[in-house]
Image (tube, rainbow, N blue to C red):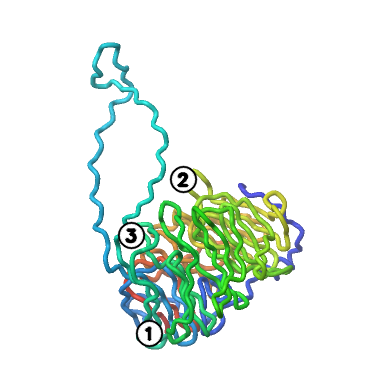
Amino acid sequence: MIFKSKFRSLAVPAIAIILFVTSCSKQGNWPQFRGPDGNMAVASASLPEKWSNDTNVIWTAVLEGAGYSSPIVWGNKVIITSAFPEKVNPAPERPPMPPAPPQQGGQGPQPGQQPGQGQVVPQPAQPPQPEIPDTSFKKEIYRWEIKCFDLKTGKEQWKQVAYNGAPKTGKNPGSTYACETPVTDGKRVFAYFGMHGLYCYDMEGKLLWQKELGVNYTQRGWGTGSSPILYNNVLHIQFDNEENSSIIALDAVSGNEKWRVKRDEKTTYSTPYIWKNKIRTELVTCGKTARSYDPETGKLLWELKAEGEQVIPSPVGNEELLFIGNAAGRETKAKLFAVKAGLEGDITNSGVAWESEESGLGNPSPLLYKGRLYVIGGKGEIAVLDAATGALKYQKRINGIGAVWASPWVNNDRIYFLDEKGTTRVFKAGDVFEQVAENKLTGKFWSSVAIVGNKYIFKGDKKLYCVGQ
């Protein structure tokens, strides 16, 4: 086993009670990324088990802009964000192929002799070249939008342009300028576009306030992706980049800054998580170093050297344990940690209940359900771990799966994973692998699903789908 367990004190009956996920989505509202409790857990007997382009689709809406942000729902309003390219640079021409290297194994040329075929010419060592930021995006024009659709009919209720002009930063060529999921409290909608600003609207689309948080270079110029979260009428934003990272708390009504804490961290894409445990409520952020803060004051509570490479998955937890980790990179393995509640200071060597390199944690956030962690890995495999000990129950490679970016969800003992090709695979919850369904929609899907009542809202690259019975 490649996990270390340091947490053995709970009695079996207590574990069963503690690790059962009791919080489910509030009926009718899906106000933020990963749902009202940030855990993708729902309980609905009326959600459809099967769907396709012509099965159980109530309505679709054509999407013009591009955005990997997820939809949110409040009452009868479905809200999305997108960025529409009005003027873009032509695709760069492919550089010519370099000449083939000389064959290996030959002898170098002798003094006074020209190198011949099969001879390797020694080359002087080249110093590492500094990264030169690409600024060609400044010549482009985009339109950042927030849209509201009617949940019953799919008709557009209102649309507002938050910002129109040249991008302030670049983005990954495969990504979009609208990756952050909006959040709402039922009175206001907060649309966050990273370096392009934070915009607050009322529920009918009237702009109430806006705020610029700064413009800083991100890793390889790939842009931003961490979504804001709302807690106790305060908006929390993980503002990480290569130059000036911080966690920021803003008053939801006025937009005024309540506190800001600098972070010794580089670019991250993970969304913060409000962890309500048996001791207190914590604001948890991922990074190469995971950190927990007091959401009221910004006081640092604990930190953990999380290692890993891609800071994309968000945490999930229960009253006893928090589950947190980063995806793997080319030279680093993914690690998944279980952190005990109520800790202080540097907990890297003292506060970890267990850690595992067997989960294969990929980009999607882990899913917690009835004492088990469900994880989709970077190579299309599903892994199930015992949440109390970290023991691997099974790991199964799924044939034909596309890349997975969307968060998995659970409903009535069924685990759901949506890949970017639009295929949702359904498995039975538990310690034995059993796939029970496979549902397909047309499009490219990076966004996580929103779930309200008996309806799913799927956001593809070209269409918004309302699926229900």
| Distance from Cα at disc 2 to Cα at disc 1 | 44 Å
The image quarter in which residue 420 lies: bottom left
Residue position for label 2: 330
Whether pointer 2 and pointer 3 mark residues with C-beta atoms closer than 8 Å, the reply is: no
Q: Is residue 17 left or right of residue 289?
A: right
Q: Which residue is mark 1?
A: 158
Give the number of the mark in front: 3 or 1: 3
* Amino acid type for the residue under numbered disc 3: Lys
Task: Assign a secondary structure to mark 1.
Answer: strand
Q: Earlier in the sequence, mark 2 or mark 3?
A: 3
Q: Residue 292's spot in the image, x, y percent?
A: 65, 61
Disc sitting over residue 138 in the figure:
3
Indicate the position of residue 309 as horizontal and vertical percent values.
51, 50
Q: Nearer the viewer, residue 209 or 145?
A: 209
| Quarter that holds the C terminus | bottom left
Report the residue at 27% width, 62% height from top: 88
Question: Residue 347: in sight, yes or no?
Answer: yes
Q: Earlier in the sequence, mark 2 or mark 1?
A: 1
Which of labels 2 and 3 is toward the front?
3
